[in-house]
Image (spheres, rainbow, N blue to C red):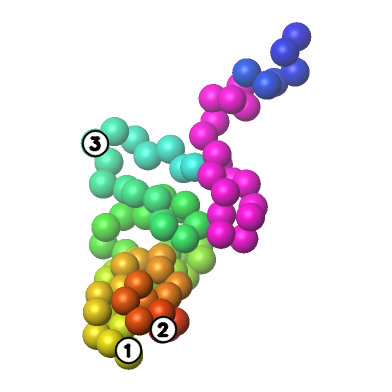
Amino acid sequence: MCGGHFVRSLIPLAVSQAGQVMPIPVVKAGSSQQPCPACGTAITPEFAWCPKCGASLRVHPCAYCGQTISPGDKLCKFCGAPSNK
């Protein structure tokens, strides 16, 4: 009767940086998994790189100014240099 709109409204969605709409992975309570900041794939804290998109999941220093760059950042927030990781 409702054409599935109710069911679709229960699935959380996110918009990727490329503008694609994708489902947010459901992480079980008590699990140590979290979504990748770049693509949303469920990952564990031990991962250094996302197995799906290859994004760095560790903080690293900026090659130009030395400030800390967070995972998923494309540019340094302090000097604007591109993140090469």
Tell me the magenta residue range.
7-23
Give the labeled residue for mark 2: 81
* Neighbours of disc 2 within 10 Å: few (<14), some (14-19), many (20+): some
Tell which tag, 1 or 3, sits nearer the viewer. Answer: 1
Q: CA distance from mark 2 to mark 1?
A: 8 Å
Pinpoint residue 2: horizontal percent, then vertical percent: 72, 13
Q: Position of residue 53 (x, y in %)?
A: 51, 66
User: Which residue is depicted at the point 47% across and 60% down?
Assistant: 38
Disc 3 residue type (three-letter): Gly
In this rendering, is residue 80 above or below 8?
below
Question: Gap in Å between the C-alphas at discs 1 and 3?
Answer: 37 Å
As drawn, which residue projects farthest toward the bottom?
Answer: 64
Compared with 52, 40 (above or below) is: above
* Mark positioned earlier in the residue sequence (1 or 3): 3
Q: Please give left or right for residue 9 compared with residue 69 in the image.
A: right
Residue at mark 3 to residue at mark 2: CA–CA distance = 37 Å
> Can residue 16 be found in the magenta stretch?
yes
Q: Are marks 2 and 1 in contact (CB under 8 Å)?
A: yes
Q: Residue at x 26, y 46 (%)?
A: 32
Q: Earlier in the sequence, mark 3 or mark 2?
A: 3
Spot occupied by residue 61 in the image (x, y as percentages of width and height): 26, 81
Query: What amino acid is labelled 1 in the image?
Result: Ala
